[in-house]
Image (tube, rainbow, N blue to C red):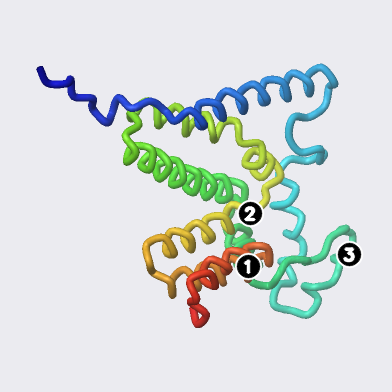
């Protein structure tokens, strides 16, 4: 008598991921409950939402001039990021509605991440329903993601470039990996640690 065929789609979520889902859900409920009890904000303590998005807007009226790097009169801010970040901000400020452009960009990037993650779970035999539920829960309880959105920070654009670099590395496209990871490090220095992936394979030129 033959054994019943177990379809790959019926494979349960790995135990580690199930434990993660339970833990992150409980921690999120506890965090929101404590914030409500203490009458504090759940996300950023800043007084204004999307503060990081608008903080440099007065400076960009002087973009392309030496005065761009000085503190704008009446505004307690000055440009402090590497110049490679400036085109990202300028593109958002060039639109009539910078916040709408920012939120639309974030939606696209997060959606791409969700689709990719669901696809990777499916390749490992996880059912579509379970993959979508787990991926959605991960996004819904991602405190760093929601803080980034609440403050209007552009960090997710850097995460996207790093993800492209790591994807290129895993697929053996080492020149593309070096290009993307180098670009990410040009935006902010921290992603330079990912270049160690290339060093470990002795791809020094890349």
Residue indicated by mark 1: 192
Q: Is residue 79 left or right of residue 174?
A: right
Q: Specify whether residue 179 is in view.
A: no
Task: Identify the element where label 2 is drawn.
Answer: helix
Task: Identify the element where label 1 is drawn.
Answer: helix
Name the mark on residue 73. 3
Q: Residue at x 76, y 55 (%)?
A: 55
For mark 2, does the 10 Å Cα neighbourhood hold few (<14), some (14 to 19), or many (20 or more) residues?
few
Q: Is residue 163 above or below residue 83?
A: above
Q: Residue at x 75, y 60 (%)?
A: 56
Q: Is 124 in front, or is 110?
A: 124
Q: Earlier in the sequence, mark 2 or mark 1?
A: 2
Q: Are marks 1 and 3 in contact (CB under 8 Å)?
A: no
Task: Identify the element where label 3 is drawn.
Answer: loop
Name the mark on residue 155. 2
At which x and y percent is residue 140?
Answer: 56, 31
């Amino acid at each position: 008598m033959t054994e019943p065929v177990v379809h790959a789609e019926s494979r349960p979520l790995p135990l580690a991921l199930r434990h993660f889902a339970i833990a992150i859900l409980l921690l999120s409920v506890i965090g929101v409950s404590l914030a409500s009890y203490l009458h504090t904000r759940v996300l950023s303590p800043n007084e204004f939402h999307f503060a990081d998005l608008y903080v440099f807007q007065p400076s960009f009226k002087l973009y392309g001039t030496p005065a761009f790097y000085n503190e704008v009169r009446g505004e307690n801010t000055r440009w402090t990021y590497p110049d490679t970040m400036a085109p990202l901000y300028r593109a958002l400020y060039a639109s009539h509605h910078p916040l709408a452009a920012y939120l639309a960009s974030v939606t696209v990037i997060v959606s791409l991440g969700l689709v990719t993650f669901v696809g990777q779970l499916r390749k490992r035999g996880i059912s579509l329903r379970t993959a979508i539920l787990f991926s959605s829960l991960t996004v819904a309880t991602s405190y760093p993601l929601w803080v980034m959105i609440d403050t209007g920070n552009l960090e997710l654009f850097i995460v996207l470039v790093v993800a492209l670099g790591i994807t290129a590395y895993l697929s053996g496209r080492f020149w593309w990996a070096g290009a993307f990871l180098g670009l990410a490090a040009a935006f902010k220095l921290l992603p330079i640690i990912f270049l160690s992936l290339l060093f470990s394979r002795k791809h020094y030129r890349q």
